Amino acid sequence: MSRVDRAPTFVLHRRAWRDTSLILEMFCIDHGRLAAVGRGARAPRSKMFGLTEPFRQLDASWSRRGELATLTGLEPAGAALRLRGRGLLCGLYANELLLRLLPREAPEPEVFDAYRQLLPQLAEVKLQAPALRAFELVLLDAVGVLPDFGSCAGSGEPVRAGMRYRVEPGTGVHICPPGRRGMDGELLLALAARQPLPAAALPEVRALMRELIEHQLDGRALSTPALLRDYPT
């Protein structure tokens, strides 16, 4: 049996189990994504009661024998973040990305930090889109499917501002054929350097991120993008 004490953790998803317990999908800075049972966590007298909401950093302790861990303690490591409206849907989208793209038990401290920085920005409407795009870039890079936006696939020729390019999931950046709209090299270079993006470019980058994510999911649709699309702004 292994034991872990006070690991920085976020709850990504939870579901009821038996009468008063929960099955939790957790994201931990040093242990990656893992599943754990919180025995009696739904009982009002439990020390875990009310601490399993998403978007709140916790210090989690557990013991483990086999695939499913058993929580032995949960402590708040920060104030609860109450996301509402579109901000809540953005947070659920980020959680769904982590659940669908990250393998189990693969520590990703950079993704954990990016997620931790993302959450408070989702409370402000004007920050939601740029914050999500930045988070998607870190996540896709961590799972090894982010193209090299600074050079052309195959030739290695540097991407140049003022030229048009197309990005193919699985292969990378290619010079755009005549008559095709493509993306400006300046935008690709900004993505490569993780620079702040102009507001006018965010819809184009959103479409690109969606294409890359859908390719990685291999036809398995996400649930939250449809909710975000239909939610009034």
Image: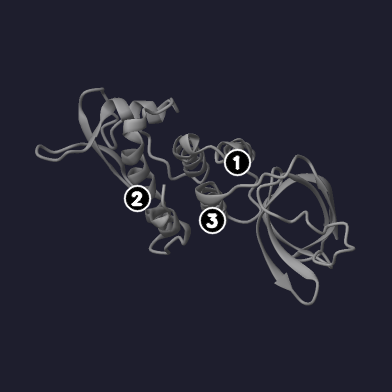
Give the crowd class for mark 3: few <14, some 14-19, many >=20 residues within 10 Å.
Answer: some
Determine whether 207 is above or below 224 in the image.
Answer: above
Q: Which residue is mark 3?
A: 96
Identify the disc placed on residue 84.
Answer: none
Q: Is residue 85 left or right of residue 34?
A: left
Instruction: Label 3, secondary structure: give it.
Output: helix
Identify the residue shown where x is 38% and y is 39%: 147
Identify the residue shown where x is 55% and y is 53%: 92
Identify the residue shown where x is 21% and y is 38%: 182
User: Mark 1 or mark 3: which comes first in sequence?
Assistant: 3
Q: Which residue is mark 2?
A: 211
Residue 69 can be seen, yes or no: yes
Instruction: Label 2, secondary structure: give it.
Output: helix
User: Mark 1 or mark 2: which comes first in sequence?
Assistant: 1
- At which x and y percent is residue 125? 49, 39
Residue type marked 3: Glu
Instruction: Tell me how far mark 2 sits from mark 3, CA to CA.
Output: 16 Å
User: Mark 2 or mark 3: which comes first in sequence?
Assistant: 3
Determine whether 45 is above or below 207 in the image.
Answer: below
Of residues 159 and 202, which is closer to you in this image?
202
Instruction: Label 1, secondary structure: give it.
Output: helix
Q: Is residue 1 left or right of residue 103?
A: right
Closest to the camera, between mark 1 and mark 3, is: 1
Instruction: Tell me how far mark 1 sits from mark 3, CA to CA.
Output: 14 Å
Of residues 202 and 79, which is closer to you in this image?
79
- At which x and y percent is residue 212? 38, 48
